[in-house]
Image (cartoon, rainbow, N blue to C red):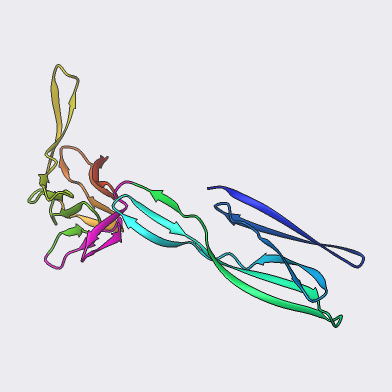
Amino acid sequence: MDLQLYYIYETHKGGCLFVAVVMGLAGLASWADTTSGSSQGTGNSLLASPARYQIAGLGPDWREWRQVVQVTNTFRWTNSLGRLVTTNSVLTRTNPAYVEMASFMNYWRNGQWNESQEQISILPQGGAAATAGQHQAYFPGDIYSGAIQVVMPNGTILNSRPTAIAYDDADSTVFLAAITNSVGYLISSNQIVYPNAFTGLQADLSIHLHQTGPGAKSHP
């Protein structure tokens, strides 16, 4: 995003007034001239307080931002009677848009795009679910008796469950611990921990939900 800094100087008695205006996306400060009566006047344009960018369009992996600003043109001139006349004209301008992109940024539901949320909620019947995204994930109350289910954007359902912790060096495999009964706890908006989830090894199973889908790892 380009930023341009405009400096406007207006001379006053005994000094100079300095005004700085910062705009995004190559916003322009316009200057206008007009003629009325017997003499020619000049007008300068001062930008109002920058408006916040607003979302103008959405897609599965992008959103478009636009900014609408108001520009006040002030014109001053001396008419044929020698009087100073001042008029203001307010114009509305839409600055060029920019597009923000990220994988799985939005998900489609109820006929519209919604912003994806890294949010896990506990279900009344037990277990937990994360449904505010292109991937939907469901987590069992007990990791030993259930499975983690992930629904892909195309509707494909994947079921998985950790079974053991093992060491493998391509020639041999040594099992260190097996999964056992463990009830999960939601410890943050996007993290579930199954404590003491293995036999033979003191370790927790931690599942983190990210915008692209869930990921699991064990913590001794």
The residue sitting at 12% across, 44% down in the picture is 161
Image coords of residue 102 (percent x, y):
35, 47
Q: Is residue 202 above or below residue 73?
A: above
Quadrant for the C terminus in the image: top left
Q: Is residue 156 above or below residue 175?
A: below
Q: Residue furthest left?
A: 145
Of the pair 38 and 195, the residue shown nearer to us: 38
Of the pair 106 and 149, the residue shown nearer to us: 106
Q: Residue furthest top?
A: 171
Query: How many marks are shown on the rendered structure?
Result: 0
The residue sitting at 79% across, 76% down in the picture is 37
The residue sitting at 16% across, 55% down in the picture is 138
134 horizontally vs 94: left or right:
left
Please say whether residue 68 is one of the residues in the magenta stretch.
no
Image coords of residue 199 (percent x, y):
14, 40
Of the pair 174 and 161, the residue shown nearer to us: 161
Q: Quadrant of residue 114?
A: bottom left
Image coords of residue 38 (percent x, y):
83, 74
Q: Is residue 30 above or below residue 84?
A: above
Image coords of residue 124 (percent x, y):
15, 68
Image: magenta residue range: 103-125
The residue sitting at 25% across, 56% down in the picture is 107
Q: Is residue 61 above or below residue 18?
A: above
